[in-house]
Amino acid sequence: MVKLLPALGGGMVAILALSSAALALEYKEAPALAAEVAAGTLPPVAERLPDQPEVVTPAEIGVYGGMIRYGLRGSSDHNHILRMVGNQGLVRWNPEFTAVIPNLAEKWEVNEGATEYTFYLRKGMKWSDGQPFTADDVLFNVNDLIRNQEFAPTHPRYMSDGEPMTVEKIDDHTVKFIFKKSYGEFLNELATPLGQHPVLYSKHYCSQFLPAYNDNLDADIAAAGAGDWQTYFIQKCGDIEVPARWGNAERPTLDPWVIDSPYTGGATLVTLKRNPYFWQVDSEGNQLPYIDTLSSDVSQDVESLVLSVIGGNIDFGLRHIDSAANRPVIAENRERGGYRMFAADPGGGQHMIINLNLAHKDTGMRELFNTKDFRVALSIGMNRQELIDTVLLGTSEPWQQGDFTGPYFNEQLSTQFTEFDPDKANEMLDGLGLARGDDGVRRMADGRPIKFLVDVIPALAPDHVDLLEMIEQQWAVIGVDMDVNPLERTFFFERTSNANDHDAAVWGGGGVQIVGVPQQLVPLHHDARWGIPWSQWYNSGGKDGEEPPETIKNRMALYDQSKSTADPAERERLLKEIAQIAADEFEVMGVAKAAVTYGIAKNNLANVPDSMVNSWFWPTPAPVLPQAWFYRP
Amino acid sequence: MLLNYIIRRTLWAFPFMFAASIVAFALITLPPGDYVTTFAQTLSQSGDVVDETRLAALRERYGLDQPFIIQYFRWISGVLVGDFGISFEWQQPVAGLIWERLGLSFILEISTLIFAWGLALPIGIYSAIRKYSVGDYVASVIGFIGLAVPNFLIALVLMYIAVVHFGTDVSGLFSPEYRQAPWSFDKFVNLLTHIWIPIIILGTSTVAGLIRIMRANLLDELNKPYVTTARAKGLTEFNLILKYPVRLALNPFVSTIGWAFPQLISGAVITAYVLALPTSGPLLLQALLAQDMYLAGAFILLLCCFSIIGMLVSDILLAIVDPRIRFR
């Protein structure tokens, strides 16, 4: 799924909002809001909307009313709410996940060297409490929070060459972000859920929790039992990936729905109600969202969520329920539950990727794992079709890694060595001089048996363990003694991503080249469990970890170049070059394509597409605009 | 004598609580990594780049970089003045999170206990007196099934039947409109219409176990000479059984009251998880998984307190029920 990068080459290119003037439209609003306007408790709709609201053209013009139930879990499910209300950043992804389009900013400009980004905010836009949203809010977010080291060290996303970005106010509705060096990826970063920081907090509300703005802060902190102002701030205003973001109904937002019953530790029901100041209208001038409320019971258990689906108590669902094992029961009960199924396509990546530790602490193991023929023999010694048919119920196909289609598709990277050929594998291992002992297990050069553990987190994906147990049997045939090592997740993280104590580990995803870091192509961070000391070397600027071999250093340099280049074509070329080197080196091996899964939507819930991207960076389903969904009467 | 014993036991509880708090805190910090590791892992799962300096800053703010003794001291000195600290995951004071859930756990556990005893004692007595009768066999078979089937499985099956055949949802303790409502008489009535399902599910195995215990104890007593003597003296059968052998057979029941107290917190975690009950079990489990140490710590500490209090209560009751038991 790659994609992206609006054309920036050749000088100043302005990208205009999809549809600008909506002045000719007469705005309409939900009946409940109209009643409030009539009662004088809310200003009229034309005053609540920006001067030029974004005009969305839905497949069908909707009617107001109704509630969407979507099925939350009680722990670590805050991002589920985010996916429903959307990440209202300066820009967002288009529905196809191929380009960045305007969102809070109606247009933007990028200078030639991609060091300056100028955003034009929508005039007259308001927070959910009716206060104006202006350039001052952006300045507050950047200067008082992103750049405030006391609050938290600046995230690398907002840095360039070790320096945090700076922001300049051009006028009340125009801001300019300035980087030290070229930063071609900035717009892509802003479009992901993680790039919302520049517009996350409202100055008029959240500033009261900062020491610089509130002289009585200490008393407030003590009253809230928070301990320090940072905790108090997060408690009240949240952050992108913490549950507290949905824990305070008072916090003003720019989202289509705002929290009504908050998501807190004891919550059993979480509801969000429409934001009367939401800044999008449909092509007939109806203010969005159509749906009145988002509501969710909080359950703990996935099985009870599935029961809710087949009982018809979920109106839209994807997260948690979309496993291969649940598909038959969910498909079978479509009529009873009154829902239809849609396809959720990850676009690229890998169901499970095996990382042998190429930077192993043990020199014997390291030497063995760094032999390409050994890795190739393991790969063709795996019967992927059998694994897919048995464990994944036939819902996938053999795959190493990488995008399924599009400009970044690389046939060699994705499909090499996926054919099952145990005879050839044995031949190759014999050729390496790895003779079998009496027990049938091959011996390394130093005489030890080839025996290693693969670390896995059962809670992350239960079928990873099932897959590995079958692979264990398949590799035994070629004389390799692998054992599955299921671990609790923090122990897994400590052991594999920090201490580098592992022989091998598995992980999901991998190889998708859009916004994330391609850690299966070049070891850049903690998820590259095939070269952790090399990633530590890279991230510490050579101080920690271990200097990587030339081929890796070469790819790291190419990656740095791609990040700073201002030209999207050049960036694509560099990333493809990295992928080609990785394909030739063949360091990591995958099992099967990340499967196209499914979600469910009630039959009368209109404007939900039959197929959508399934990704965290394109936070499904937000970019297909749930605010424009409605119930057909 | 009894008063003296109670005072002595109560005084002993303090050093024991202190030791228990150290062990509890040590257990919570024992798993590799800490809350920040879990947090980093969660971010990593969603594809975020976890920046080491940010993690270090978080660790410092939460005091997780300090040695065990200092962390423990900070925690316990807060607890002594009623401050259980902040839940890292929810960024809320722990005290605000636990009490409502504990209250509901308490209601559920007491109701289940009353249900189980109310059902198990008469059935147990009946099975013992009418040994090998049809009624005894029926009670035994049902009892064994109740013992053998895990509660959470019964819960799942019941939920499935309710959804698929009756189109209703049996999970939770309240209807949606009462979930967030403040306590009122209507809310209480609503609770009553929901709570019987978990009571029956949780009660089955307890009932089954108690029937077997009651039956076995009573059978031991029924053949003893004092029973024969009493019968020879002309006592009615009903009075005889209830007044002498049943009273003795109750001893093991009374001593299990002590176990019921910690169950208030940790009881039926999996069943509560499956049924989405707003009780303390699921929150404790989640706190442990997330290494949310102050939240988990508060629960574990209360668990220890309840165990100690429970044991004390059951010892005292035992002395009252059976005057033969004497304190030294």
Image (cartoon, rainbow, N blue to C red):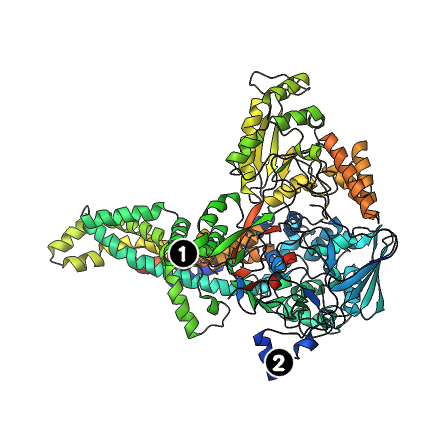
Left or right side of B217 for A519: right
Residue A589 placement, left or right of A577 = left
What residue sits 68% from the left and 75% below the top?
A: A48
Kindly state the secondary structure of the residue where label 2 is placed.
helix
Dividing the picture into quadrants, the one containing residue A482 is top right
Residue B163's label in the rendered image is 1
Which label lies toward us, 2 or 1?
Answer: 2
Question: What is the three-letter code of the residue carrying label 2?
Answer: Val
Residue A300, image x and y in percent?
51, 54
* Residue A401, quarter of picture: top right
Residue at position x 32%, y 53% from top?
Answer: B207
Expressed as whole percent of the image width and height from the top left, the position of residue B249 reads 27, 53
Q: Quadrant of residue A89?
A: bottom right
- Work out whether residue B271 or residue B107 is closer to the camera in this orientation and state it: B271
Residue B222 visible to the viewer: no
Going by the numbered disc 1, the residue's amino acid type is: Val
Could you tell me which secondary element the residue under label 1 belongs to? helix
Distance of label 2 from label 1 (alpha carbons): 42 Å
Quarter of the picture holding the N terminus of chain A: top right
Q: Residue furthest front?
A: A24
Q: Is residue B233 visible?
A: yes
| Label number found at residue A37 | 2
The reply to whether label 2 and label 1 mark residues of one chain is no
Please name whichever residue, B184 or B252, is drawn nearer the observer in this view of the structure: B184
Residue in the image at 75% along x and 66% along y:
A20
Q: On screen, B55 above or below B102?
A: above
In front: A83, or A335?
Answer: A335
B69 lies left or right of B139: right
Where residue A561 sits: x, y (%)? 83, 43
**Structural crowding at the residue carrying mark 1, measured as other residues with C-alpha within 10 Å and reported as few (<14), some (14–19) or many (≥20):** many
Q: Which mark is residue B119?
A: none
Q: Residues within 10 Å of mark 2 (few under 14, many from 20)?
A: some
